[in-house]
Image (cartoon, grey):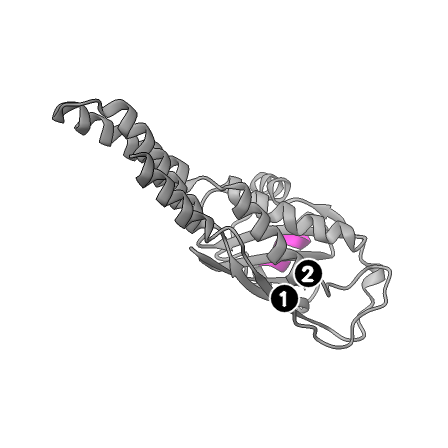
Amino acid sequence: MKTVVLNVLLIASLFVVGCSKGESYVRVGYDFSKLNKVAVVEVAGVVEGDVAKNQIADFLGMELLKKGYAVVERAQVQALLDEQNFQASDLTLSDDAAKAGRILNIPVVLVANIPQYDENVSMTAKMIDVQDASILWMGSGFGSTGKTMGTILGAAVGATVGAVVAGGDSDDKVVGGIIGGILGGVAGQALTPEQAENLQELIKDICEDLPSRFGPYPSTTKQK
């Protein structure tokens, strides 16, 4: 059993190193210095659970802060919209996101969409003017998530716990297998530090050319 677990961990180590790539486009000539606040109104797509979505929104908020913007975080936005009984079919749509921004009395909103989140992740993000629902900035990127490693490590945890519980006879092995499977599944689904680090790196790449309030503003698209 020790050999099996060690082999599983060795395989998992192959997935430690991740990479990401991002690019973005900006409306040339727009004066970003006049923007004082940006609200991260939504993180949509295949990522499940508000905890993970809020964490991703926080990573986006960190990049906005670096560029000089005051940030209204997603959790606060959701609470304020709920108070107003605001309903939208899809906050990733520019029109719906702009309506939310007008309710919040914030000039610009940012939305993110994650259509893929398994071993790899792809993401788009866009900054929207709430007055006319036009896109001021849009970025996209892809990279690895570390989820494969998390799942494999979860299996290793399950196998180890199952072996400890199993003992010698067949009945104990069945019980040990059940307990190990449960614990392994939980460990495999958790957002590991590696996953968080890889997602944050991807967002940094996407937002690298996000215009700063203080200029200068990029006139070309940059890809990493």
Left or right, 148 with respect to 99, comes to left
Q: How many marks?
A: 2
Q: Do callouts 2 and 1 mark residues in contact (Cβ within 8 Å)?
A: yes
Q: Give the percent coordinates (x, y) of residue 144.
A: 50, 57
Q: Give the percent coordinates (x, y) of residue 152.
A: 38, 45
Q: Which residue is mark 1?
A: 139
Q: Which residue is mark 2?
A: 207
Name the residue located 49 percent from the left edge and 42 percent from the top edge.
191
Question: In the rendered structure, which segment of residues is drawn in magenta?
Answer: 97-103
Closer to the camera in the image, 152 or 163: 163
**SS at badge 1:** strand
Within-10-Å neighbours for mark 1: few <14, some 14–19, many 20+: many
Q: Give the percent coordinates (x, y) of residue 78.
A: 58, 43
Marker disc for residue 64: none
Could you tell me what secondary structure mostly forms the magenta stretch? helix
Within-10-Å neighbours for mark 2: few <14, some 14–19, many 20+: many
**SS at badge 2:** helix
**Residue type highlighted by circle 1:** Gly
Q: CA distance from mark 2 to mark 1?
A: 7 Å
Quarter that holds the N terminus:
top left
Name the residue located 41 percent from the left edge and 43 percent from the top edge.
9
Q: Does 99 appear in magenta?
A: yes
Name the residue located 85 percent from the left edge and 64 percent from the top edge.
215
Q: Does 13 appear in magenta?
A: no
First of labels 2, 1 by sequence position: 1
Name the residue located 33 percent from the left edge and 34 percent from the top edge.
2
Residue at the outermost left position: 170
Closer to the camera in the image, 11 or 40: 11
